[in-house]
Structure formats: structure tokens, C-alpha cells
Image (cartoon, rainbow, N blue to C red):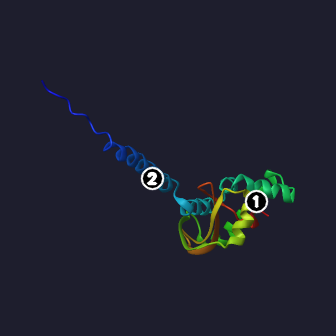
């Protein structure tokens, strides 16, 4: 008569714990890679700027930032969008009209700087406890068209809220 050997499941216990933890870690890294971190938000901002899309830029702000501006300045969303569109059009004409027709753009984010605790505290007052980080990039926008090229520097200010990066420069919307 044959006897069955009992399986020792204690060997599987570490596997049952480690594999799910590795899967969670891999998922978090994949999410961070897909969401792109601050650089992808910064480049999206520069792309919307050069396309003169005020609505696209406004979508890159955390909703509480826009609500703050509306509450403290009494502006309606349409007024903010209209003012921003006007500023974008003027900024574009001033910086890139000399490049001629068929302009293409290249973007480079450099000189990333983390912000001080005082600025983070101010952002937490506006947005809430989800604020975990804020950075500033120096953005280089190079326009090339039929009449030549021009490079313009623009500062990109971003805040991380609940793992997602948003614009936070309210001065641009005033």
C-alpha cells in the first residue's frame, strides 16, 4: 500500500505574499511611467501654449486652483478662459510671428527645482492635503518656420496632488 506524502504549504506562504507585493510595485511603476510624471505634464502645457489653446491649458490645472481664483477674484470660468486666450494670442504673436509660416515646435524641460516648504504649505491651503510635491522647470520652446527659428524660455510650475501633476501658476490666469 502506498502512502501519500503531505504537502508542506509553508513553502508557498512566502510566494503568496511576495508575488502580490511585486505585482503591486510593478503596477505602481507602470502607472508612473504611463502618467509620465511632471515632465509629461510640463510638455503638454508647452504644447497647449504654442497651439494657443486656453481651454487645454485650463484642463491642466487642478479644479481647486480654478475655484480658488473664481472665489478670490470673482471671475467666472468664461472670463478666465477669455483672458488667458487673449494673453496666449499676444504671447504667440510677440514670440513667434518672426518665424514665418508652417511653424513646428520642439520642447525641452531643464533645471528642475523642487519648491520650498512655504510654497508647498500655500498650495496645501488652496488645494488640500493631497499636495505632496511641487517643482519648477525651465522650459525651452524652439520654433522653426519658413523665416527662421527662435527659442523662448518659459517657466513651468507644477504641483503633485494625489499622485497626479497639475499646473499651479495662478499669475498666468490673472
Mark 2 secondary-structure assignment = helix
Give residue 78's position: percent from left, percent from top.
79, 51
The total of numbered circles placed on residues is 2
* The C terminus sits in image quarter: bottom right
Give residue 155's position: percent from left, percent from top.
64, 71
Give residue 109's position: percent from left, percent from top.
55, 70
Q: Is residue 49 left or right of residue 128?
A: left
Q: Residue furthest right?
A: 74
Which residue is identified by label 2? 25
Query: Residue 112: which quarter of the image?
Result: bottom right
Q: Nearer the viewer, mark 2 or mark 1?
A: 2
Which residue is identified by label 1? 126
Give residue 141's position: percent from left, percent from top.
57, 70
Front residue of 54/69: it is 69
Query: Residue 52: which quarter of the image?
Result: bottom right
Q: Residues within 10 Å of mark 1 (few under 14, many from 20)?
A: some
Q: Is residue 40 left or right of residue 62?
A: left
Mark 1 secondary-structure assignment = helix
Amino acid at each position: 500500500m502506498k502512502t501519500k506524502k503531505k504537502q508542506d504549504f509553508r513553502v508557498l506562504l512566502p510566494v503568496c505574499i511576495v508575488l502580490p507585493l511585486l505585482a503591486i510595485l510593478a503596477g505602481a511603476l507602470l502607472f508612473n511611467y504611463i502618467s509620465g510624471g511632471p515632465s509629461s505634464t510640463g510638455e503638454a502645457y508647452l504644447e497647449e501654449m504654442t497651439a494657443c489653446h486656453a481651454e487645454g491649458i485650463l484642463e491642466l490645472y487642478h479644479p481647486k486652483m480654478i475655484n480658488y481664483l473664481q472665489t478670490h477674484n470673482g471671475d467666472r470660468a468664461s472670463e478666465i478662459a477669455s483672458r488667458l486666450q487673449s494673453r496666449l494670442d499676444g504671447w504667440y504673436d510677440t514670440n513667434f510671428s518672426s518665424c514665418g509660416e508652417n511653424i513646428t515646435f520642439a520642447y525641452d524641460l531643464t533645471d528642475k527645482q523642487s519648491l520650498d516648504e512655504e510654497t508647498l504649505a500655500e498650495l496645501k491651503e488652496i488645494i488640500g492635503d493631497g499636495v505632496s510635491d511641487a517643482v519648477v522647470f525651465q522650459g525651452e520652446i524652439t520654433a522653426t518656420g519658413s523665416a527662421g527659428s527662435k527659442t523662448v524660455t518659459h517657466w513651468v510650475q507644477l504641483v503633485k496632488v494625489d499622485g497626479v501633476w497639475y499646473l499651479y501658476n495662478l499669475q498666468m490666469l490673472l
